[in-house]
Image: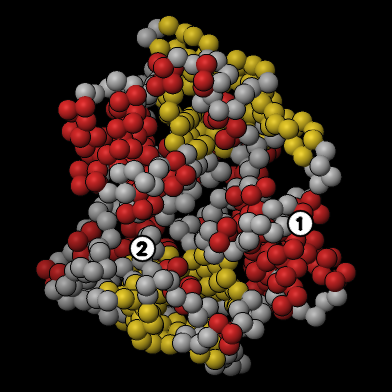
Amino acid sequence: MTAPSPRLMVENLQIGGAGFLVVDRVSFTLGPGESLGIAGESGSGKSTLLLSLMGMMRQGLLHVGGSVRLDGRPMLGQSDAALEPVRGGKIALVPQNPATALNPSRRIGAQIDEALQLHSTLTRIDRAARVLDLLGRVRLPEPAIAARRFPHELSGGQVQRAAIAMALAGEPDMLLLDEPTTGLDVTTQAALLDLLVDLRHRDRVGMVCVSHDLGVLARLCDRIAVMYAGAMVEEGPLVPVLTHPGHPYTRALVASIPRIGAAGLPLPIDGNPPSLFHLPTGCRFAPRCALVQDACRTTRPDLELLDPDRKVACLRPMTIPAPVTRPSDAAFAIGAPILAVKDLSVGYAQQNMFGKTTPRQVVEAVSFTVQKGEVLGLVGESGSGKSTILRAIAGLAHPGSGSMSLTRDGETRVLAASSTERSLAQLRSIQLIFQNPDASLNPRHRVLDLLAQPLLLYGKVARSQLRAKAAGLLAEVRLGAATLDRMPAQLSGGERQRVAIARAFAAEPDLLLCDEITTALDVSVQAAVLELIRELARKHDVAAIFVSHDLAVVRAIADRIAVLRSGRIVEIGPAGDLCERPVDDYTQSLIASILRIPA
């Protein structure tokens, strides 16, 4: 039986600008029902490659060389009018930021209906039914209500699902997925991946999926390509690539993944990717490689066959398992309780599709304590109340009932419900790090100004010592003093998150609240941020509450874990015991939903 001819062909593709290439000599083919995963750190060219498959270019970039063909049709160098019937009907893109795919001024249902008008012959009545069917397939609750919502009225995970529903409206033959599950909890993520796998096998939809989560790629893809500094360094069948990587960079990526069955922190990759303007003369990974030799610094390896079905760009490739040794600080002594939450309940007013407002209880009778130096993890599905608990502790959400108390210098005081009613000392003691640093860092201020605000507000430094103190804070989060004069837009996502962490520690807090702070980071940066939070919490004897929908991430950093379901704690205990011997059925289902990479 002959293999099906490729639908998508990419040959020696080069995309870049004056003096640099974002995508450098990338080639692959994809047939009906096949799925290719693309992995690599931020800035490796993954999203730029994905856009080029749609015949699109980021501003300032040009098609330098090579080709992209879909069913024999060239995709680059064509007008938007020529590609209009192809985009959405033959090939569709789910972007990393779903807000860029949705019009904020139009209802969700109307936007999906518009895609159906462009790419189907359904009647108005049939289109309305199809809209609800699509929203139901991506597990949006109450599809009829969701269809009438505007994008800003949905949660981040719900907006992501709506974007996927819109991409599926035209029933494309090829689906491009750019971080499709970012921000989704494990159960919703598992259901969406089941849907995508079903599309592959039942409808023979080809897929190219970019993700920093190798577990997502392991669930969805047959093959994987690893990119570094714009070039492919390894490509082949997913299982052998992940279990016995041939390139040192692939091995380092695999080692940076948190695993539910392993105690301690994952291993971050030392150093940073090179500037595309100043690439190393030899192997691009040589400055960060633990196995580097002299020849690696002078000779750039080509992507060559390692075995009949795998290619590796390395002068001395190996097929040995990636290291999974993790540091442990189990001997660290946890201190006395610093925060006590008792019978906390928080509710909001919710408006239905008919405009009627009804109360909705988000958190119900939650109680727990946090000790000095301890990291407490809060996990649960979207809407379980995790972030609401953090906002209540920070004084940003008013509890309906219950109490919170903070112990400082041996004295325990009740925390007022609102931050405006708290003393300056209490405000200093509790610092919140948000999920998206872009939303919390003023884009018009230099990093120095951002760090100066808490230092001056809480009287921690004289103005003459401001720059030196700010540089010291950056050093603690492993950023150089040159960062002080940069604007947030000049930093990578991981660097912006480190600035947000430095700003929180500028206040010298007693309690740190971390709200999904690693969700949008690639695995290597995530590993570094987890290590940083744990290290700083231990060093400064600071307690931390770490919220995440990813139980494997929480397992890596937390001393204890509390599992939330529908606003209630259903199980709480030491991280190892809870993950290895869960008692509650819901906890067991969360652990069962965790995506695992082949071992």
Dot 2 amino acid type: Gly
Quarter occupied by the N terminus: bottom right
Which residue in the structure is indicated by mark 1? 147
Which marked residue is nearer to the observer: mark 2 or mark 1? 1
- 172 versus 597 height, above or below: below
Residue at (34% x, 43% y) in the render: 445
Which mark sits nearer the N-terminus, 2 or 1?
2
Q: Residue at x 58, y 59 (%)?
A: 98
Does 423 appear above or below 182? above
* Residue pointed to by mark 2: 43
Task: Give the class, few, some or many, for how many residues have Cα within 10 Å of label 2's Cα (few <14, many ≥20).
Answer: some
Judged from the image, the secondary structure of the residue bearing numbered disc 1 is: helix
Which residue: 79% across, 35% down? 357
Whole-Å distance between the Cαs marked 2 and 1? 35 Å
Residue 271: give x, y in percent of width and height.
25, 54
Query: Tag 1: residue type?
Result: Ala
